[in-house]
Image (spheres, helix red, strand yellow):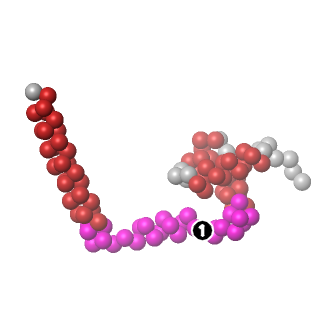
């Protein structure tokens, strides 16, 4: 059995940064100065131990990218409409409060 230079707590907390965080394994590995292959191995072992689908993160990313151009345009138009309404409300509120201060 080989002697690891990383403690169990360090490995667990590092894996949790990747699994529960928004950063990729590569980003975390660079920030903590760990070999990325080592971190990927820790993640694989963690997922195997907890019966988590190995490629679950990749599946989520693929499903997001399957949005068609028409769907994206529809979503963006709706979002744009809401943002314009919010902007108009804020303009009216700013004008109202500006009148009160004069």
Position in image of residue 56 (x %, y %): 58, 67
Position in image of residue 24 (x %, y %): 55, 53
For residue 43, side relative to residue 73 (left or right): right
Q: Where, quadrant-wise, is the N terminus in this rendering?
A: bottom right
Q: Main secondary structure of the magenta part?
A: helix
Q: Residue at x 66, y 67 (%)?
A: 52
| Secondary structure found at label 1 | loop
The residue range painted magenta reads 46-74
Q: Residue at x 53, y 69 (%)?
A: 59
Position in image of residue 32 (x %, y %): 64, 41
Q: How many marks?
A: 1
Q: Where, quadrant-wise, is the C terminus in this rendering?
A: top left
Q: Residue at x 19, y 54 (%)?
A: 85
Whether 47 is among the magenta residues is yes
Whether 17 is among the magenta residues is no
Q: Is residue 35 visible?
A: no
Q: Residue at x 77, y 44 (%)?
A: 6
Vertical relation: 96 (above or below) 102: below
For residue 23, side relative to residue 4 (left or right): left
User: Dot 1, crowdedness within 10 Å: few (<14), some or many (≥20)?
Assistant: few
Give whichever of 95, 54 is nearer the camera: 95
Please identify the residue farthest to the top as the structure is shown: 102
Position in image of residue 61 (x %, y %): 48, 65
Vertical relation: 81 (above or below) 88: below
For residue 50, side relative to residue 96 (left or right): right
Give whichever of 98, 84 is nearer the camera: 98
Please identify the residue farthest to the right as the structure is shown: 1
Q: Is residue 84 visible?
A: yes
Vertical relation: 76 (above or below) 91: below
For residue 16, side relative to residue 27 (left or right): right
Q: Which residue is mark 1?
A: 55
């Amino acid at each position: 059995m080989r002697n690891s230079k990383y403690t169990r707590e360090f490995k667990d907390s590092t894996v949790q940064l990747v699994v529960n965080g928004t950063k990729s394994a590569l980003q975390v590995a660079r920030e903590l100065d760990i070999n990325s292959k080592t971190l990927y191995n820790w993640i694989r072992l963690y997922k195997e131990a907890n019966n988590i689908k190995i490629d679950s993160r990749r599946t989520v990313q693929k499903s997001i990218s399957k949005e068609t151009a028409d769907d994206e345009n529809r979503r963006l138009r709706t979002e744009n409409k809401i943002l314009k309404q919010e902007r108009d409300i804020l303009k009216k509120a700013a004008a109202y409060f500006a009148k009160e201060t004069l």
